Amino acid sequence: RTNLTVELTGDIPKIDAFVHAVRPHGLLELVRTGKIAILRSDA
């Protein structure tokens, strides 16, 4: 068995197209976060 973790960024239609393309290959889990913010350090 092979596992694969993918992180995607893009607009909604592009993400939806990817999900549609990989679903027939056995997509097991999907998490969509929406917009997030990450603080940068001063270093």
Image (tube, grey):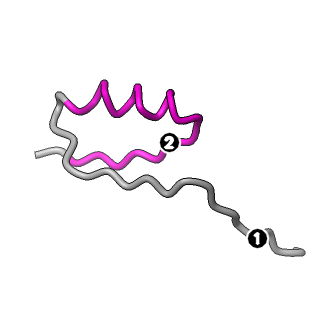
Q: Position of residue 8 (x, y in %)?
A: 50, 42
User: Residue at horizontal 31%, vertical 28%?
Assistant: 20
* Highlighted range, magenta: 3-23
- Residue at the far left: name it: 1
Q: Residues within 10 Å of mark 1 (few under 14, many from 20)?
A: few
- Dot 2 falls on a residue whose secondary structure is loop
Nearest to the observer: residue 34 or residue 25: 34
The residue labelled by disc 1 is 39
In the image, residue 24 sits, relative to residue 28, either above or below, namely above
Q: Position of residue 7 (x, y in %)?
A: 47, 47
Pick the quarter of the image with the C terminus: bottom right
Q: CA distance from mark 1 to mark 2?
A: 20 Å
Q: Position of residue 16 (x, y in %)?
A: 41, 32
User: Residue at horizontal 38%, vertical 55%?
Assistant: 31
User: Is residue 40 left or right of 19 when viewed as pictured?
Assistant: right
In the image, residue 34 sits, relative to residue 26, either above or below, namely below
User: Residue at horizontal 17%, vertical 31%?
Assistant: 25
* Quarter of image, res 42: bottom right
Q: Position of residue 5 (x, y in %)?
A: 35, 49
User: Is residue 33 left or right of 28 when viewed as pictured?
Assistant: right
Query: Is residue 1 shown in magenta?
Result: no
User: Residue at horizontal 62%, vertical 55%?
Assistant: 35
Nearest to the observer: residue 16 or residue 1: 16
Q: Which mark is residue 8?
A: 2
Q: Amino acid at mark 1?
A: Leu
User: Is residue 11 left or right of 26 when viewed as pictured?
Assistant: right
